[in-house]
Image (cartoon, rainbow, N blue to C red):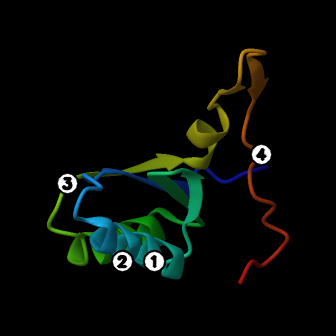
Amino acid sequence: MRSFRDMYTIVMFDIETKNNQKEITKFKKLLQILGFDMFQYSIYYKHSTTKEIALSLEQSLIKDLPHLGKIAILSITSAQFCRMKIFYDKEKEVVSPQPLNQNFLII
């Protein structure tokens, strides 16, 4: 059974690419260093085992935000994340994300 304390932190950003590619690349590298995975081009997510870890992650992000564009940070429970419906192409295939298996340590 999954813990309701498990959280996913989602970062969404909209930064004008014209003349800002260096800033975008720097921000994406920061997300990767912090362990985020790309969901879409400007949406990244990361699993945290506790709410406290998710809040600490948010604080780390806020400290190093770029000074351009719009950036949103959202933390939701693992249960909420797994209720997401994902549609591919015209076939409208619905896929729900699978929760991470807590029996494995990911480094």
How much space separates mark 4 and mark 2, taking CA atoms? 29 Å
Estimate the x, y position of residue 25 in percent, counting from the top left. 39, 72
Using the rendered image of the protein, determine whether residue 5 is visible from the camera's viewpoint. Answer: no
Estimate the x, y position of residue 1 in percent, counting from the top left. 79, 49
Closer to the camera, 53 or 65?
Answer: 65
Name which residue type carries label 2: Lys
Classify 76 as above or below 96: below
Answer with mark 2 or mark 3, whichever residue precedes in sequence: 2
Name which residue type carries label 1: Lys
Residue wearing tag 1: 29
Q: Secondary structure at mark 4?
A: loop
How much space separates mark 2 and mark 1, taking CA atoms? 5 Å
Closer to the camera, 8 or 43?
Answer: 43
Q: Secondary structure at mark 1?
A: helix
Answer with mark 4 or mark 1, whichever residue precedes in sequence: 1
Name which residue type carries label 4: Gln
How much space separates mark 1 and mark 3, taking CA atoms? 17 Å
Judged by depth in the image, the label closer to the viewer, 4 or 1, is 1
How much space separates mark 3 and mark 4, taking CA atoms? 31 Å
Q: Is residue 44 left or right of residue 97?
A: left
Q: Which mark is residue 69?
A: 3
Name which residue type carries label 3: Gly
Residue wearing tag 4: 98
User: Looking at the image, which residue is at 54% across and 67% down?
Assistant: 36
Whether tag 2 and tag 1 are in contact, CB under 8 A, the answer is yes
Answer with mark 1 or mark 3, whichever residue precedes in sequence: 1
Residue wearing tag 2: 26
Dot 1 surroundings within 10 Å: few (below 14), some, or many (20 or more)?
few
How much space separates mark 2 and mark 3, taking CA atoms? 14 Å
How much space separates mark 4 and mark 1, taking CA atoms? 25 Å
Dot 2 surroundings within 10 Å: few (below 14), some, or many (20 or more)?
few
